[in-house]
Image: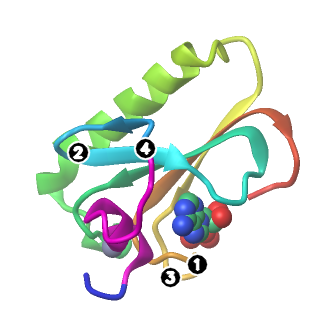
Amino acid sequence: MDNCLFCKIIKKEIPKEFDYESENLVVFPDINPSADSHLLIVPKKHIGGVEELSQDNKDLLAEIYETANALVKKKNLQNSLYRIVVNGGKAQHVPHLHFHFLGGQWKKMV
Ligand code: AMP
Ligand code: ZN
């Protein structure tokens, strides 16, 4: 989508270092972190909100949660506090489905 910030990041029109990238998603740090570790897991395909999801997205959603699982382990948060916040609605700031991964010391709530 032309005027979408995350689409621009994914198309590399806005420079951003990815912590992880696959064929279907990217992971990069939130620019205004709410916790010690605040990453965004973002599907490459522009999905405006959960109402656009269908059975066709089953594999993508599984990969997103597998990625979150891997991040918990990579950051050794298995026995600590962490949160996954899904923003896939019309009230969020960036209207492109994304998953906040938050761990460690909290600064503020997302
Ligand atoms: P929301 O759509 O409400 O989840 O808010 C968008 C999130 O994207 C906020 O947490 C912002 O700090 C974050 N954000 C906005 N612009 C950038 C950027 N250029 N790079 C990384 N994160 C961003
Ligand atoms: Zn987008």
- Mark nearer the viewer, 1 or 3: 1
The image shows residue 26, relative to residue 81, as above or below, that is below
Location of residue 22 (image quadrant)? top left
Outermost residue, front direction? 15
Residue type (three-letter) at the residue carrying disc 3 = Lys
Residue 11: percent from the left, percent from the top? 25, 65
- Mark nearer the viewer, 1 or 4: 4
Report the Cα–Cα distance between label 3 and label 4: 22 Å
Pick the front one: 59 or 3: 3
Count of marks, rendered view: 4
Does residue 89 appear to the left or right of 101 in the view shown?
A: left
Mark number, residue 60:
2
Q: What residue sits 47% from the left and 32% below the top?
A: 68
Report the Cα–Cα distance between label 2 and label 1: 22 Å
| Magenta extent | 4-17
- Mark nearer the viewer, 2 or 1: 1
Residue type (three-letter) at the residue carrying disc 1 = His
Q: What residue sits 31% from the left and 61% below the top?
A: 10
Q: What residue sits 19% from the left and 53% below the top?
A: 57
Pick the front one: 19 or 81: 19
Pick the front one: 19 or 104: 19
Q: Which residue is mark 3?
A: 90
Report if residue 6 lies within the magenta region: yes
Question: Helix or strand or loop: what does disc 4 sit on?
Answer: strand
Residue 49: percent from the left, percent from the top? 38, 73
Q: Which residue is mark 4?
A: 27
For disc 3, does the CB lie below 8 Å from ligand 1? no
Residue type (three-letter) at the residue carrying disc 2 = Leu
